[in-house]
Each structure stands twice: as C-alpha cells, then as structure tokens.
C-alpha cells in the first residue's frame, strides 16, 4: 500500500509540473489592517478555484494567476472578506476592515436553508474543521462536548462503537429510541433494529445484542462533513413531526466548487494504549487472602502451594495479557471541482483500528460522490451517493461475562499458557472454574460484516422568481452478516465438548420520496417565505439464520455441516410506513421582527387505524433589539442583541412495526412443533407526545469578538411508550423461545428543563498571535412526573442476572440507582442487638430461648449495618428487608461542559479541547464483584487488604465462632466488611458502597500543527501542507475508581444507565497526521 501511495503522489507532482509551461502572471502584494499593521495568515484564494496562498509574517503574498484568472478573494477571521479585480496590476495593497456583524452564513434547516442570523429557534452549528480535531471512526464520537445541550457519552471504547447522544436530556422511557434523528444531505439515517430480532449472538456467548444495521452513522466518513446543524427545541424540530422528538442533527457533506480540480489527501496514524489499570491482587496478596478465607471457614483448608506467600512471585497479570498497545490508521483522498454548469466532490477513505483489548478490531472503507448539475437556468439536479463496507471483530468486550470482566476476576495463580504452549486454565481442585479469557477471545469467533448504501437524487425547479419546487428520492440499504462460532476446548477444568456455529443474514431497506414547494419574496420591508410539502417513506427488514452443533472439526464453521438433529433455521420480516404533510411560514419585517409557524400531519402504520394520524404544531418569534434606534448608545459594546421565544409539539412512533396487533411464533412441544402467540396486542396504543418551550438570547460584543448564546427550555413528554411490566406468572419472563412479550402501552410523563450557554471569543487577534476560544455549558434536570395507568408505580432495571439496580419512581430522575444505605460496621454483639434486625439475624432456639449465633450463617461482628428506612406501612419498622431499598443517586450529570481553544502563532497552531461532566453517579458493578470476599477462587481488588479483620478478645480454641469473644483488630476502610465464604449477611447487595461519583474533566484532545510555508511547497505544486501531532484522551481527572467514568446506556439491559461491569475503556491515542492539498 505504501508503494502505491508513493506512486500516486509522484504522478500528482509530475502532472502539476507539466502545467507550469502555461501562460501565468505573478501577482505580489501586502495585506494590512485599518491601522496599517501587517496581517499574517490571511487567506488569498483565486476566485472560481480552491487554489491560493496565505500571507507571511509581514503580510506579504505571492500568487501565480493563469490565463483567464482575474479575481482574488482575501479573508481573515474577524475581518470582512474582499474580492479584488487584478486586471493588469502586478502589485496590490489590500486593507481589510473589521467585521461589524457576525458572518451571515447560510445554514441548513429542516426542508430548506436560511441565513444564520435569521434563525429564531434554538440550534447550534458545528463545523467540519472542528470535527477533524478528533481522530474517530464514527461521526457521533466527534460531537462530544462540541455543542451546548448535546450530551454525548461513549458507550464503549471498542473500535467502531457508537456514542449515546441525548439532546436536552432523556425524553422517552426507552433508551433504544432516545437517539436524535440524523439527516445527511436530506436523507434520514435509519438505525433499524428489526422488530426485536437482533443478531442474536449474545445469549450463549455472553455479548449483548448488536444492531444489524450498524447505526447508520458508521457509513459516514467524518472527513466528508462540511457542517452540522443541531436542532434542539420543538419549534425547530416540529417540521420533522414524530421523528423530531429527540432532536434533529442535520449533516451537510462537502460539495464541489466551480474551478479547476483540487485534490486533498490526509493521513493519520495513531498508537493506542490503556490509560489506566485496576489495582487487583498479585499472587502474594491473593495467597494471603485465600489463606485467610480458608482459616475462617469450617471445613476448608489452605491450598498447599499458597501456604507461604513470601515464596511466591507476582503471578499472572491478566490485564497485561488482555490489554495491548494497538495501531490505528486512516487515509482519506478527495477531488473537487467543476464548471458553472456542473460541480463534483468525490472522496474515498480507509480506516483501520485494532482494539486495545485482544480480539477486537474495526475496519472500514467508504466512498462518496456528490454531483450538482445545472440543466437549465431554471432547473438544477444532483445526487449524493455513499457506500461503506466495514468489518467488526467484537471480542466479547462489553458483556456481563466479557473478557475484561473475566480477566479482572481470574486468579493470578492461573497461567495464560501451559508449558507446551497450549492454552492453560483453572485446574484448582474444588474451583468452579473461570474460563481463560485470552483463549476465549481468540478462539471464539464473533464477527459482523456490514455493507451500507445511502443514495439521494434531487431536482430543483424554479417556476418564477421566488417560487421553486424541490423533489427528493432517497434510498438507504443496509446488509449485515453476523458470524459466531464456539469451538470445543479444554482449558484446565473448564471445557466445552460440543462446538456450535451460527450465521445470520440481515437486510434492511428504507426509501423516501418528498416534494416541497417554496415561495420567498420581499415586498419593501416585508419578507415572507412559505413552504408546503408531502413525504412518504417505508422501512422494511428481513433476516435468515442457520445454526447447528457438533461440527466435525473446529476448522469447519458452516452450520450446514453440523449434526442434522441440531440444525435450526430462523427467519423473519417486517415493515412499517409513514406518510406526512407539512408546511412552514416565515415572516420578518425589516430583518428586525420575526415570526415562524410550522405544521406537520403524520400517519404511521405502527399504530392501529383509530390512532394512526397525529398533528404537530410549532411557533417561534424573534426580536433583533440591537437594530432599534435606542440601542445606538451601547452598540459599540453590545453590537448584536436578539431575543428568541419558541413553542412546539413533536411525537414519537419508534416502537417497531405493528405493535398494536398480535403475532404468532413456533414453539417446540412434546408432541412436535407447535405455534403460540408471541406477544400481547394493544390496539389502543397511541403516539408519544412532547411539548417544549424555549426562551433564548443571542449577544455579540465588540464587533462580534465575543458571542454569547443562552437558552432556557422546558420540555414535557406525555403518553410515553414503553412495554408493560407484567407479573412473571403471565409468562412474560424466561427464555426467549417460550416467553410472551408484554404489550406496548402509553404510561409515563417526563419533564426535562435546563439552561444552555455557548460562549465564543477571540481574545487575541494580532499579526503574530491569534487565540480563539469556545465554551459550552449544559445543565439539565430530568424527572419522571407520572406513570398514568401503568400496572406498577415504578420501572425496574436489572444488572447481571436478577439484581434490580435501577428504579425509576415518580418525582425522581430516570434510571436512578436503587439499593440499601450502609450506616457502618457492627463492632460487637450488643451493636447487632441494638440495631435494626438484619435479614440474617440469628434465629431463637426454641428449647433454650437463646439466639443461635453462627459466624458462617448469621449476621456477625464485622458485617455491614444497613439503614432502616421503611416498612410495609411506609415507616421504619426495625427490620432490614426489601422495603429499605431507596434512591441512591442519578446517572445523569448535573451539568456538562466543553472548552475548546486554538492558539495560532505564525505557522504553528496549538489546539486544546477539554470536556467533562459533573454530578452524575456510576454504579461500579465490576468493583462489587472484586470486593465480594465470599470465596477463595476469584481475584479481588488490592484494597481488600484494608478490609475489616477480626481477632479474639481472649486467645482460646474456637474463638472465631464465639461472638462474645470476637473483636475487630482492623476496621475496614470505606465500610469494607469482614471476609466470609457465602456472605451470610449479604454484605455485597446493591448499596451505596458501590455508587461512586462519576464526575470528570478530560483533556480530550491536545494537538500541535505546523503549516509549511507556501514559499517552500508552492514550487512543487502543493497549495497547502499541514503536519499534526497530538494526543487524544490525554488525561482524565476523576474520583471514579474504575477504568473510565464515562459510562452510557447498558449494552445488555433496558432501563439501565451508568452501570460499569467491566466496560471497554476508551484508549489514550498518540496521533501523527499529514494533510496535503494540490
């Protein structure tokens, strides 16, 4: 590949050298500000091309103009751009004037465009240049911390993993449908999960369900992005109706520009490493701990090889074995150009990222073609086509029993390899056995192959001045093939005697056709715009799977070669459709007073005939106060001041197809294959509804050297869509092949309210040094207001197996952590007797009337004292039981922030980007597993050495089972109780011991770029050359004890957010990059 690249670049240089014989004119000059001071770094572009140069430190420039080129455009941040006709001049003297108003760029809104200064709704722009500061596989990863009101949490550090994005909080009770709508060049990107049928590779292999469509955004190369507009309030998103409930992200890709062909090539290479390790026991510590457990447990003896810990070494470092230093690389090449009648942008990219966890990786190829053609003066057409192919090696890295989880708990006395080089395993007598996590990751196959196509064709016809019709047809196709293979193995005393294989093929299709007519004219000071349109779309899916066991060899993976009586075939299909009518009316008077009204009428097949259609309205207004005469006295300080207000309605229909009806599925029985009802129908299910109010101000200071944007919002979601939580006796729990899926219903009401602040500034703008700064701040309060007609007054979320870890109750935030509160550690028998009765309080001997104390089966000195909070009647009752579980904290931050700084000195640019959260809680579930202290087989945290340790008051035989002769000789730190096999007091139940502060401040990106002077590169036909070195995820300041405090939605459980069970941590990446333009 390196040789091909060198050849390609050589041909480029040769091609450009051949052109130097064409007739050229050399133009020189100097650019200054209004005081005459030279301006370095001013962009000088030949009009009609992308070719140009920049001024040097003294403001001088030199540029070659070919025959027919006669105009130069001069632009610099903080100054008004100028276009100069060269004619016969050979030397120019240019003076740039400071801007008096922010650049009035045109931005994309729903079904149209608008000048940014005319937007009366709450929205925020992110430029493609800002996105390029972060080296990421997917677009959503690059959005973190870039926009106020947008919370982006990495769900996994696994290569290619998506980011959980929430705009103005969680607005629905379903985490799966809480993502915003993404629209790329007018095409909605579908994240289709087909009717509950996922890849299905999780239950047996320990991994969570994987979307078979690939999240849509994985098809988009971040380097192709020109800009992103994020619509946040309902007055902006109502034009999308039922799709806009969670906000809308409008993505505009790069397009061709009139002029000769220009080429751009960028290369990035990174080295990844894990930034943090968990401090678990080494072999000596583990031996001492294991001996202690054995000594305090009747009937158990210490293992002979561990009796003298001083003779042992460090043992196996399973984190060292699991984590690795891994490379990452990205190549991007693009071509752009065109004539007055046609323009093109063509790009291709390659991205390859090996995971820092062994067995994981991601590889992707993308290609894009954007074409725009003027067929007639009144008729324009164009197309946007994207193709992406990717391959994921998943590696079991985020599941309840994934490789990280298992590696942390595997004992250091178990080696990775046997002496003969084969996989080792747990061979300890009596051990339940832990599978070798390295062998598991490398021997088992879990792979996804995706092929995505996104295509759009448009036609713009102008009938008369101001009246135009736009027609768009879009097609989105996603094919995902999933392959899993579980081999036979023998790793110590852990074995699998029958291999198994499963292949699944998934096809998803989405098409859309829309037409909208726009009329825009100005009549004096009156500027109305009216848009009306209609849209129809359909989404369909199908899958086919085959599986079998007992294949002839581990080298044979095809399910068709397994034993006949083990073969199973699965299939499914479904579709949903939507039809919509919409309109928007904008009016402004003299660009000072603004009014906007939108209306949309949606019909969805996801609902029954009686509830299929729903209307959505919105309105907004804006007053440009700074244009009033009375503002003149302060305009030299506050040059721009706008007040915005908005109200709107949106909805949500994202529940899968035909949930209002019942369906059937097959079921094996003793008499053969039969059929049963698979779900409970609810023909009365309705649209989820949302109403939002917004009040905002936009202010510009000192000729827009400083911009301040503040928004207050109040958003209420009603008729929330969720699955009913029905009793297990109705058959709604258990194995997927036999359970009855509960019906969807309309139950809850959620409120989100908050404040958003965006602060942009250019503190320093001089001839040698420029400093630009951007700060975003978001504060959101999320509350469940009601569960109307719900079967229960709360919503439960489960951890591993049947642990209830979250409980959403009225008046609290969604997915709040739920458990017991610890008051301390029992120090004596009297302390136990004088405290609320724990669940393991000793029983009374009926014959003697005495309590039957037993250190192995009852509450004991050194156990945790849990708080008595409530009872059956809602009051403390002196008994510790399920009524004493309570709210322990919210997984949502009190506020989040981002701070981006760019320092430019001569040809050097330093970029520093910091982001973080404050006030959110994290349930350290893996930390709980590593402090159980209830067996002698699993490894534990090194902090377990700081546990509560008991000793005798009087040294006599059998003292440890005499509660009157027991005392604490070491009080455990942070309420760490005694170690005891079986944990009779259930010290390890979900409690505030495991709830940690998840606040953090992260140096997300630090990079240093050098722009090679044009006097050096222009002689080789190169227009621009930038060299960059940087570090991503450089350092994180946090009190969280786990790998990474940034924890999003659970990969394996609904209604759970902020639970860390050995989640794949985000790596630290050292990056080198090169960008060259021809």
Image (tube, rainbow, N blue to C red):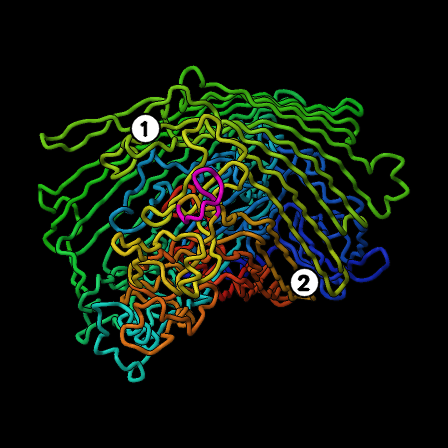
Residue 1013's tag is: none
The front one of 934 and 699 is 934
The front one of 33 and 301 is 301
Q: Relative to 272, say whether 595 is above or below.
A: above
The front one of 669 and 87 is 669
The residue indicated by pointer 2 is 903
The front one of 995 and 562 is 995
The residues tagged by marks 2 and 1 sit, at their Cα atoms, a distance apart of 53 Å
Q: Quadrant of the C terminus?
A: bottom right
Residue 852 vs residue 779: left or right? left
Residue drawn 52% across and 34% down? 186
Residue 866 in the magenta stretch? The answer is no
Residue 290 horizontal/vertical position (percent): 29, 72
The residue indicated by pointer 1 is 574
Residue 237 horizontal/vertical position (percent): 58, 32
The majority secondary structure of the magenta stretch comes to loop
Residue 151 horizontal/vertical position (percent): 55, 47
Q: State which tag comes first along the sequence, 2 or 1.
A: 1
Within-10-Å neighbours for mark 2: few <14, some 14–19, many 20+ = some
> Can I make out residue 835 in this image?
yes
Q: Give the range drawn in magenta.
A: 869-881
Helix, strand or loop at mark 2: strand
Q: Relative to 867, say whether 790 is above or below.
A: above
Front of the two marks 2 and 1: 1
Helix, strand or loop at mark 1: strand
């Amino acid at each position: 590949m390196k040789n091909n690249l060198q050849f390609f670049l050589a041909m480029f240089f040769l091609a450009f050298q051949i052109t130097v014989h064409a007739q050229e004119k050399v133009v020189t000059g100097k650019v200054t500000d209004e005081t005459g001071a030279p301006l370095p770094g001013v962009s000088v572009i030949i009009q009609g091309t992308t070719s140009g140069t920049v001024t040097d430190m003294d403001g001088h420039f030199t540029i070659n103009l070919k025959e027919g080129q006669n105009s130069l455009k001069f632009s610099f941040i903080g100054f008004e751009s100028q276009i100069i006709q060269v004619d016969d001049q050979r030397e120019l003297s240019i003076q740039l004037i400071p801007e008096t108003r922010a650049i009035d760029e045109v931005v994309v809104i729903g079904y149209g465009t608008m000048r940014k200064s005319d937007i009366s709704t709450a929205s925020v722009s992110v430029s493609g240049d800002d996105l390029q500061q972060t080296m990421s596989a997917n677009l959503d990863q690059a959005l973190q911390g870039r926009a106020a009101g947008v919370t982006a949490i990495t769900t996994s550090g696994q290569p290619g993993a998506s980011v959980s994005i929430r705009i103005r909080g969680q607005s629905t009770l379903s985490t799966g449908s809480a993502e915003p709508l993404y629209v790329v060049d007018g095409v909605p990107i579908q994240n289709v999960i087909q009717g509950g049928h996922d890849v299905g590779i999780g239950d047996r292999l320990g991994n969570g369900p994987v979307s078979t469509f690939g999240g849509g955004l994985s098809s988009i190369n971040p380097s192709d992005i020109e800009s992103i507009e994020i619509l946040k309030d309902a007055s902006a998103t109502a034009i999308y109706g039922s799709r806009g409930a969670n906000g809308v992200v409008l993505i505009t890709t790069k397009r061709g520009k009139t002029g000769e062909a220009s080429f751009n090539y960028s290369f990035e290479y990174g080295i990844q490493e894990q930034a943090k390790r968990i401090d678990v026991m080494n072999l000596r510590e583990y031996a001492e701990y294991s001996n202690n457990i054995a000594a305090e447990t009747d009937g158990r003896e210490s293992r002979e090889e561990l009796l003298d810990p001083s003779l042992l070494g460090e043992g196996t470092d399973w984190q060292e074995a699991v984590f690795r230093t891994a490379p990452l690389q990205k190549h991007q090449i693009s071509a752009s150009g065109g004539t007055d009648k046609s323009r093109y942008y063509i790009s291709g990219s390659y991205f390859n990222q090996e995971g820092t966890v062994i067995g994981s990786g991601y590889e992707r190829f993308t290609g894009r073609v954007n074409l725009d053609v003027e067929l007639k003066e009144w008729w324009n057409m164009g197309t946007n086509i994207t193709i992406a192919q990717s391959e994921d090696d998943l590696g079991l890295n985020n599941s309840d029993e994934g490789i990280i989880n298992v590696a942390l708990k595997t004992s250091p006395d178990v080696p990775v390899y046997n002496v003969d080089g084969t996989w080792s395993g747990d061979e300890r007598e009596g051990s339940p056995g832990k599978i070798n996590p390295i062998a598991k990751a490398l021997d088992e196959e879990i792979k996804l192959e995706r092929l995505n196509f996104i295509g759009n064709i448009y036609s713009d016809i102008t009938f008369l001045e101001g009246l135009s019709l736009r027609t768009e047809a879009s097609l989105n196709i996603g094919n995902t093939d999933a392959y899993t293979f579980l081999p036979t193995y023998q790793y110590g005393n852990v074995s699998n005697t029958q291999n198994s294989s499963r292949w699944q093929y998934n096809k998803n299709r989405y098409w859309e056709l829309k037409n909208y007519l726009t009329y825009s004219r100005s009549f004096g000071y009156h500027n109305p715009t009216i848009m009306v349109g209609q849209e129809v779309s359909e989404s369909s899916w199908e899958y086919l799977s085959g599986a079998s066991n007992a294949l002839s060899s581990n080298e044979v993976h095809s399910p068709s070669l397994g034993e006949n009586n083990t073969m199973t075939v699965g299939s499914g299909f479904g579709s949903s459709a939507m039809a919509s009518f919409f309109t928007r009316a904008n009016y402004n008077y003299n660009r000072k007073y603004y009014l906007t009204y939108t209306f949309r009428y949606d019909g969805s097949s996801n609902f029954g005939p009686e509830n299929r259609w729903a209307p959505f309205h919105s309105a907004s207004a804006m007053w440009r106060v700074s244009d009033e005469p009375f503002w003149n006295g302060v305009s030299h300080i506050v040059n721009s001041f706008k007040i915005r207000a908005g109200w709107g309605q949106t909805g949500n229909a994202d529940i899968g197809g035909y949930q209002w009806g019942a369906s059937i599925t097959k079921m094996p029985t003793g008499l053969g294959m039969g059929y049963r009802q698979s779900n409970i129908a609810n023909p009365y299910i309705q649209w989820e509804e949302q109403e939002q109010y917004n009040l905002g101000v936009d202010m510009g200071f000192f000729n827009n050297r400083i911009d301040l944007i503040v928004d207050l919002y109040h958003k209420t979601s009603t008729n929330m869509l969720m699955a009913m939580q029905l009793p297990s006796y109705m058959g709604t729990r258990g194995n997927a092949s036999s359970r009855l899926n509960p019906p969807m219903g309309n139950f809850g009401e959620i409120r989100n309210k908050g404040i958003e602040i965006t602060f942009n500034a250019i503190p320093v703008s001089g001839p040698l040094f420029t400093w630009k700064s951007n700060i975003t701040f978001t504060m959101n309060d999320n509350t469940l207001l009601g569960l109307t007609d719900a079967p229960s007054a709360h919503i439960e979320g489960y951890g591993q197996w049947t642990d209830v870890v979250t409980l959403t109750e009225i008046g609290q935030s969604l997915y709040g952590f739920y458990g017991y509160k610890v008051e301390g550690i029992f120090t004596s028998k009297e302390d136990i007797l004088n405290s609320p009765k724990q669940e393991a309080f000793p029983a009374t001997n009926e014959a003697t009337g005495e309590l039957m104390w037993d250190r192995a089966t009852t509450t004991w000195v050194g156990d945790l004292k849990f708080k008595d909070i409530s009872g059956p009647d809602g009051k403390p009752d002196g008994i510790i039981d399920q009524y004493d579980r309570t709210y322990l904290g919210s997984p949502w931050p009190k506020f989040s922030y981002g701070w981006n700084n760019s320092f430019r000195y001569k040809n050097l640019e330093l970029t520093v980007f910091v982001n973080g959260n404050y006030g959110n809680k994290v349930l350290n579930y893996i930390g709980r597993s590593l402090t159980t202290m209830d067996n002698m087989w699993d490894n534990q945290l090194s902090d377990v050495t700081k546990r509560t340790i008991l000793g005798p008051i009087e040294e006599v035989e059998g003292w440890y089972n005499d509660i009157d002769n027991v005392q604490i000789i070491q009080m455990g730190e942070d309420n760490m109780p005694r170690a005891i096999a079986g944990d009779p007091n259930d010290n390890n139940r979900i409690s505030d011991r495991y709830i940690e502060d998840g606040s953090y401040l992260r140096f997300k990106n630090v990079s240093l770029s050098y722009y090679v002077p044009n006097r050096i590169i222009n002689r080789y036909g190169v227009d621009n050359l930038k060299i960059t070195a940087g570090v991503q995820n450089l350092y994180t300041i946090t009190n969280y004890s786990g790998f990474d405090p940034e924890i999003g939605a659970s990969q394996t459980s609904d209604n759970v957010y902020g639970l860390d069970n050995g989640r794949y941590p985000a790596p630290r990446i050292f990056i080198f990059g090169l960008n060259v333009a021809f």
